[in-house]
Amino acid sequence: MNNNERSITMNTGPKHLFLAIDNVALPFRKNVCLYLNKPTVRPEAVLKPSSFESNAPDNLATHFYGTVLHDAGKFRMWYYACHWGKNPDWTPHLMRQLAKSTGPTFQGPLCYAESDDGITWTKPALGQVLFKGSRDNNVLALPHACVCTAIVIKDEEDPDPARHYKMTYQFFPDQTDPAIEENGGMPTVALAVSPDGLHWKVIGIPFRNQFVEPSSFIKHNGHYVIHFQVMDNWAGYFAEGGTPCGRTGVAHVSCDFTKWPDMLVEAFALAEPEDRGRRSMSGDYDQVHLGVGAASFGNVCVGLYGLWHNARNDNAFGQISCDFGLLISQDGIHFHEPVKGHRFLRREDSLVTPVPGHNFNTILCQANGILNVGDETRIYHGRWRNSGSEARHYSAEVALATLPRDRWGALALNPGTNEGSICSAPITIPSAGCALTVNADGVAGLAVEVLDETFQPIPGFSEGKVTGADGFDCPVIWPGHVLADLKGKVVRFQVRLRRMGDVSPKLFAMNLKANIV
């Protein structure tokens, strides 16, 4: 074996997920190719702005630069609002942060919603903040008024219950008194913790005077990762050779959430034009909007990026639109496309609520919105109406797309072929043993063989049978043997595909689940 592959040897936790779209976990293939799936989009938004007459904090826009968690049987959403007219009840400290904002529209505050089914949402009265004469609203009390992004994780591994919920959000500091925020006026990120996801305490501002607008925040492989974008040399980032660059996905990484090294890493970028004169955030070429919107599934991360179809100058802003591209990662930091240049979700398939007589572009926005619920993968996302200079038509809403669980794409036979195979990267069987299931259709045409690290068959583990009907968790059985017989050994799983009549098998994922001791 070569050293490069040894570096990607994977050891299991309680569960290990091999996705068909993951060409690191499933790198070896013969007569098979990847067929990406297309998500189904609910045409109606799941969360819309409140009515203009309501004086609610989100009577202009409900922006999903936010989060959905399925938490203790309930769906919970954090998002940022926009509203018409300044809130006269902000405290003097918060009012100073808005001193130079002339309106009529205002960005922020952060808000909360919840749902029993993830489709019909309520905006509970939290009573935390006085807003336009009433505390009957869903505003979260924070030390900043002008904010965007509400990126939340639930971290039950933290021994301190007061820190079980962690949030990163972007704020725009006080421009009238720099001594208050001491960060030079650049919008940056604040860190907050909570025991319940409702009552928050800010514990740090790690990147003062540096632009950080989170696109997602995850915990993966024991590290906390904030994904965001840089552009036009912001945060000291340049393209190859010290040239300017357009929007590029980058990340900050921490081992404990409180201390963050003041360095960034490129997470995902699109190619810059050869013409260096076109390179910049205002260049007329596709760029990575917001960065990576990632979700951790234990050993692997799936993400989306905004495929930002840019305009040449600010006067053409209304021409800008944005689709989604699909990403995959082992470390939660460096991402790549399973299929280069593929538009996973086009804005035409998830259009923002239209305005009669107008044809405004839709901009799709990703964040912490990917989660598995039962046999479904849900992709909550934002879509905002790019009305250009027509502020009266500006709006944003939260939308939902779905896939069958983990079925981002399938490995299936090439056209015109009847047999093929797939082989995994090496993985260590846990000491307690484990069981293997497949997420597949056409399971009668699948067989699974266990190989050693050098691709040699292991006696007794050839032609493992996939039992049961097509589905998400089809068990694999080797007569007379179980995977616990191989505990501690480094193995590979080789899947053989065979066309059965008119049915060609499709492998979406494999799950290796450790036995409970």
Image (cartoon, helix red, strand yellow):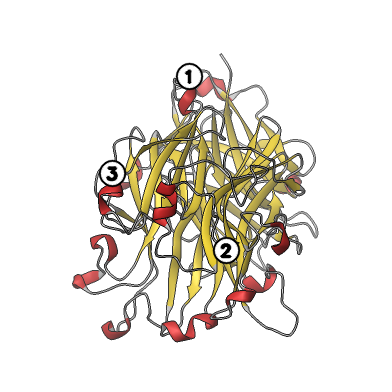
Task: Give percent across and percent down for residue 153.
Answer: 51, 38
Amino acid type shown at disc 3: Asn
Report, in whole angstroms, how far the alpha carbon at label 2 lies from the one at label 3.
Answer: 61 Å
- Tell me the number on the disc at residue 248: none
Q: In this figure, which residue is indicated by the disc labeled 2?
A: 85
Report, in whole angstroms, how far the alpha carbon at label 3 lies from the one at label 1.
Answer: 24 Å
Amino acid type shown at disc 2: Gly
Q: In this figure, which residue is indicated by the disc labeled 3?
A: 3
Where 90 sits versus 163, above or below? below
Residue 260 shown left or right of residue 449 in the figure = left
Near-viewer residue (272 or 508): 272
Residue 191 shown left or right of residue 165 in the figure = left
Task: Give percent across and percent down for residue 468.
Answer: 78, 36
Task: Give percent across and percent down for residue 12.
Answer: 48, 30
Residue 357 shown left or right of residue 320 in the figure = right
Q: Is residue 201 visible?
A: yes
Task: Give percent across and percent down for residue 56.
Answer: 66, 54
Q: In this figure, which residue is indicated by the disc labeled 1?
A: 431
Q: Can residue 407 be seen in this view?
A: no
Query: Are circles 3 and 1 on residues that touch, CB within 8 Å?
Result: no
Q: Residue at (45%, 45%) from the top-left corner?
A: 217
Tell me which numbered mark, 1 or 2, is placed earlier along the sequence.
Answer: 2
Judged from this view, the residue extending furthest toward the top is 517
Where residue 464 sits, quadrant-wise, is: top right
Near-viewer residue (4 or 292): 292
Mark 3 lies on a secondary structure that is helix
